[in-house]
Image: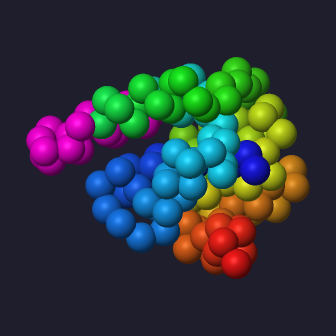
Amino acid sequence: MKIVVDTNVLISGIFFTGPPFQILDAWRRGVLKIVVSPDILDEYQRVGVELADRFSAIDLQPVFNLLTITSIVVDPLPLPEQVCRDSDDDKFLACAITGKVKRIVSGDKALLETSGYAGILVMTPRDFVERYLKRRKG
């Protein structure tokens, strides 16, 4: 299954346990494919570096290296009009459209409100784990 992962989910999965960690673990095990764009990779890196300065015991480079090697990288066109009330989040929708991804996992309220746009389901990490990952284990 291919998904787009919002920055808050990726960073939470690196620094904490819970559903975001479970999603990253499923990706590391090859259960999921993460689809990204250069803009999304840049945002992951920028936010990760900011947090790594505060949490020096965490080494983000192995995760970023794995993302670069195993993710599906697409080069989306901008959306024809702003969809998300936070225009910076439109890059996740554009990535999903170009990558033919039907699910974005996010904890961002503005992005969650766009669920259904272009047939893309935007869901919280907890909802994604409950609907797609727990079912695979059983």
Classify 56 as above or below 41. Answer: below
- On the picture, is 47 further left or further right than 94? left
Q: Residue at x 69, y 61 (%)?
A: 122
Q: Is residue 90 in sight in this rendering?
A: no
Q: Main secondary structure of the magenta part?
A: helix
Magenta range is 43-59
- On the picture, is 22 further left or further right than 31? left
Q: Residue at x 31, y 30 (%)?
A: 61
Q: Residue 3: percent from the left, percent from the top?
A: 68, 48
Classify 86 as above or below 95. Answer: below
Q: Is residue 49 in sight in this rendering?
A: yes
Q: Residue at x 43, y 60 (%)?
A: 21
Classify 80 as above or below 75. Answer: below
Q: Residue 62: percent from the left, percent from the top?
A: 35, 32
Q: Residue 26: percent from the left, percent from the top?
A: 57, 55
Q: Quadrant of residue 58?
A: top left
- On the picture, is 114 further left or further right than 57? right
Classify 6 as above or below 69. Answer: below
Q: Residue at x 54, y 40 (%)?
A: 88
Q: Quadrant of residue 96?
A: top right
Q: Residue 114: percent from the left, percent from the top?
A: 71, 59
Residue at the right extreme, as displayed = 119
Count of numbered tags: 0
The C terminus sits in image quarter: bottom right
Q: 135 or 2: which is nearer to us? A: 135
Q: 138 or 36: which is nearer to us? A: 138
Q: Is residue 55 magenta?
A: yes
Tell me how the rendering is colored: rainbow
Q: Is residue 30 magenta?
A: no
